Amino acid sequence: MIPRYTHKDMAQIWAPETRFKIWFEIEAHAADKMAELGIVPKEAAAKIWAKGRDATFDVARIDEIESVTKHDVIAFLTHLSEIVGPEARFVHQGMTSSDVLDTCFNIQLTRAADLLLKDIDALLAALEKRAFEHKMTACIGRSHGIHAEPVTFGLKMAYAHAEFQRAKERLQFARKDIATCAISGAVGTFANIDPSVEEYVAAKLGLAVEPVSTQVIPRDRHAMFFSVLGVIASSVERLATEIRHLQRTEVLEAEEYFSPGQKGSSAMPHKRNPVLTENLTGLARLVRSAATPAMENVVLWHERDISHSSVERGIGPDATVHLDFALRRLAGVVDKLLVYPENMQKNLDRLGGLVHSQRILLALTQKGMSREDSYAAVQRNAMPVWRGEGQFLDLLKKDKDVSRLLSAKELESLFDLNYHLKHVDTIFKRVFGHA
């Protein structure tokens, strides 16, 4: 985890101290149930909790033990025995390492998902605020990067809001899907541990029981989880790229907030660069990079191998940390975004009325001209405007084929900007439930 892109609360989920605390809770809850079943002395289970509940697990000591054992769970259990004493022999009865590792990893992912869901909520709030602020702020819509027809800046924010609402729903599903517990022993048969132990531990930790876990929790769950993170990252990049385009000097319809004392370039003092959204584009690539190895982790040998382990030690922290940072940053960008309605209107007018070409086309067909002839008539008057050779309305008025069917007054009425915005409220009601 790179400190530059890491928030403390997300980093804490992946800290070794947190991992070992979760490992202890899994083992202690299992011991409690085994004590209830008469497999472990009740006094031993009580002492395990008493000694371990408030213990500070020594990460350096565990690492030292692991340097000899070459096994992280055994190293932890050895250190736990140093803390608990002789009763530690009743820890890990009938369990295998994956019971601890996989259940812990899923707990960490669910906690990470909870933070990410809060991040999305903050972003949704920022998007809704800006959407209503600029609900009727007209700007040009673009297809292929070329001026098309008018939209509003509020609609751009509404598009993003709907997208991140879908992201929230996907992440809620992914969180539920990943929140499973496996305490089923070697190769998952419960030969040396009662299934009720798994049910007990799962309930205590707020997880569902994994129906069948071989020796590991099936990795299709994790593939789904990291794929959802990748899709959310793509949505982050989509909005970031939109803002980057709108900030280009030739466009300048919106711009990242530029704080007092901020510098844009070491060489050119005039620069105001979209550094935050460019950073988001890069972070999105990192988050998406976790999806492919997560899917490759689905394929393990027979009941278990550890080819997935090294991958997950990296992508678990990295993907969640980077997405957490990206979502928070994007919410800040949206909240403080500088919006320039005057430039939006200037760009709308830039092509001399060509944004109304479809209305002319449709009006001519309504008057009896074939669609092919209507298209040709509109296009032959549009092309000179592209070359800067007049205004679209003036050229249409002079065209005999057009003026024969549409009066000057009728043509002028077809250049009404508000015509394109008449259903904005309908779209807002669909997105936000109200207009």
Image (spheres, rainbow, N blue to C red):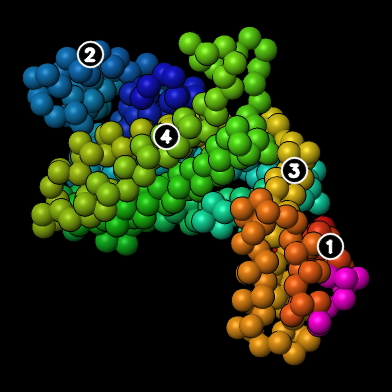
User: Disc 1 designates what residue?
Assistant: 416
Q: Amino acid at mark 3?
A: Lys
User: Disc 4 designates what residue?
Assistant: 283
Q: CA distance from mark 3 to mark 2?
A: 67 Å
Residue neighbourhood size for the residue with mark 2, other residues' Cα within 10 Å, grouped as few (<14), some (14–19), many (≥20): some
Q: CA distance from mark 3 to mark 4?
A: 33 Å
Q: CA distance from mark 1 to mark 2?
A: 75 Å
Out of 408 and 145, give the one closest to the viewer. Answer: 408
Q: Which mark is residue 346?
A: 3
User: Disc 2 designates what residue?
Assistant: 61
Q: CA distance from mark 2 to mark 4?
A: 35 Å
At a point 29% along the width and 57% down the height, the residue shown is 220
Q: CA distance from mark 3 to mark 1?
A: 16 Å
Out of 132 and 271, give the one closest to the viewer. Answer: 271
Q: Earlier in the sequence, mark 3 or mark 4?
A: 4
Residue neighbourhood size for the residue with mark 1, other residues' Cα within 10 Å, grouped as few (<14), some (14–19), many (≥20): few
Residue neighbourhood size for the residue with mark 3, other residues' Cα within 10 Å, grouped as few (<14), some (14–19), many (≥20): some
Check if mark 3's residue and mark 2's residue have beta carbons within 8 Å: no
Q: Earlier in the sequence, mark 1 or mark 2?
A: 2
Residue neighbourhood size for the residue with mark 4, other residues' Cα within 10 Å, grouped as few (<14), some (14–19), many (≥20): many
User: Residue 228: where, in percent of width, then height?
Assistant: 42, 52
Q: Earlier in the sequence, mark 2 or mark 4?
A: 2
Span colored in magenta: 404-411
Camera-nearest label, 3 or 4: 3
Residue 406 among those drawn in magenta: yes
User: Residue 114: where, in percent of width, then height?
Assistant: 52, 41
